[in-house]
Amino acid sequence: MRVAVPRESEPNETRVAATPESVAAMTKLGVEVAVEVGLGAGLHWSDGAYEKAGAQIISDRAKLLSSADVVLRVRKPPVDEIEHLREGCLQIGFLDPFNEADLIRRLAQAKVSAVSMEMVPRTTKAQKLDALSSQHSVAGYYMVLLAAERLGKVCPMMMTPSGAIQPARILIIGAGVAGLQAIATAKRMGARVEAFDTRPVVKEQVQSLGAKFVEIDLGDTGETAGGYAKELTEEQKAKQQEGLTSACSKADIVITTAALFGRPAPVVITDAMLRQMKPGSVIVDYAVATGGNVEGSRPDEEVELHGVRVIGVSNYAGRVAVDASRMYANNLSALITDLWDKESKHLRVDPEDEILGACLITHEGKIVNAMIRERLEGGAS
């Protein structure tokens, strides 16, 4: 069986889907691995390092793809490359399946079996494969560093001969994986940290990291079966904005991580709330690529709104691409290991498998994921 790893085609994508270590892990199984020339050059992994790990280095991209049984990527494949994938090929990456109707249909028509890493279930059994969480984690860390660098103030309390410096106040909105890592990072930097989430169940996790949980009575909220926050009613949104206005007005830094899976991000900080914040304060909007949590934020731009610097980066994990790539590549090699059949020396692609069944989007010419099929095909197969 042959696994191919091409370079990413999106201009702002700095991560890669394989490292020399992940290549070595796959070749130990008996998998033949081929990578595109220069795959890891931007991260200081030479072609020689990949060769030493057991990979073949291929310069002809079309040949690399057409000879593969499995293609590993970070992002979705360009539509014009689908014709190079052989029938039955397994394409694995972040596919954004809810928003890529044409791509998903074309993959099905080409009889490519497509796995979307966003859809890996959040279960104990699937932890090693949970690429979304691994990328959220490094992004949560980076967002705090980015905000602190832009703030122009120090984060910890300092007692100096020139006087006392008070700790920076950092508010984290959303206590998922990214938010919890942001809390931990902010606490390590010595800041005074508060956090808010619509799910009361995360209060204990927030407090265990040393942050204060912001209490806002929203009534019945909770989370989905996949661990994501449920969408709020209009009345709940109004109560949330009222409560967060006070918390934001005291903060030097606000990190927003609120997202709804497969839907546009909710606006959490409105223009009116921005007007109440301190001049010189900083907001980092994690959800800017899907619409943004902050009214007026723009992808890959830093804008000043009413004296507040609002930062929007569409690929936060890509800013710490070495470790983000290591984590993601390990997720992929763990998936290959989980699906590997020692007897046949091929992968078991079973739509009924507990883990694979949740993230397999297309297979044998059909859209097999029920949620995606309902969204894209109106319930038709």
Image (tube, rainbow, N blue to C red):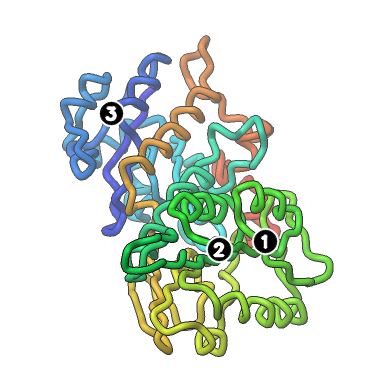
Residue 259 place in picture, x, y as percent:
58, 63
Residue 109 vs 167, above or below: the answer is: above
At horizontal 34% and vertical 34% (from top left) the residue drawn is: 18
Label 1: element kind: strand
Q: Which image quarter: residue 316?
A: bottom left
Disc 1 versus disc 2: nearer the observer: 1
At horizontal 41% and vertical 67% (from top left) the residue drawn is: 165
Q: CA distance from mark 1 to mark 3?
A: 48 Å
Q: Which residue is nearer to you in this view: 204 or 106?
A: 204
Residue 96 place in picture, x, y as percent:
50, 56
| Residues packed near mark 3 inside 10 Å, few (<14), some (14 to 19) or many (20 plus) | many
At horizontal 55% and vertical 63% (from top left) the residue drawn is: 172
Residue 178 vs 327, above or below: the answer is: below
Label 2: element kind: strand
Mark 2 or mark 3: which comes first in sequence? 3
Residue 352 vs 306, above or below: the answer is: above
Disc 1 versus disc 3: nearer the observer: 1
Please name the residue that numbered disc 2 is placed on.
172
Label 3: element kind: strand
Residues at marks 1 and 3 touching, judged by CB atoms closer than 8 Å: no
At horizontal 32% and vertical 46% (from top left) the residue drawn is: 321
Please name the residue that numbered disc 1 is placed on.
213
Q: CA distance from mark 2 to mark 3?
A: 42 Å
Please name the residue that numbered disc 3 is placed on.
34
Q: CA distance from mark 1 to mark 2?
A: 10 Å
Q: Amino acid at mark 3?
A: Ala
Question: In which quadrant is the N terminus drawn?
Answer: top left
Q: Amino acid at mark 1?
A: Phe
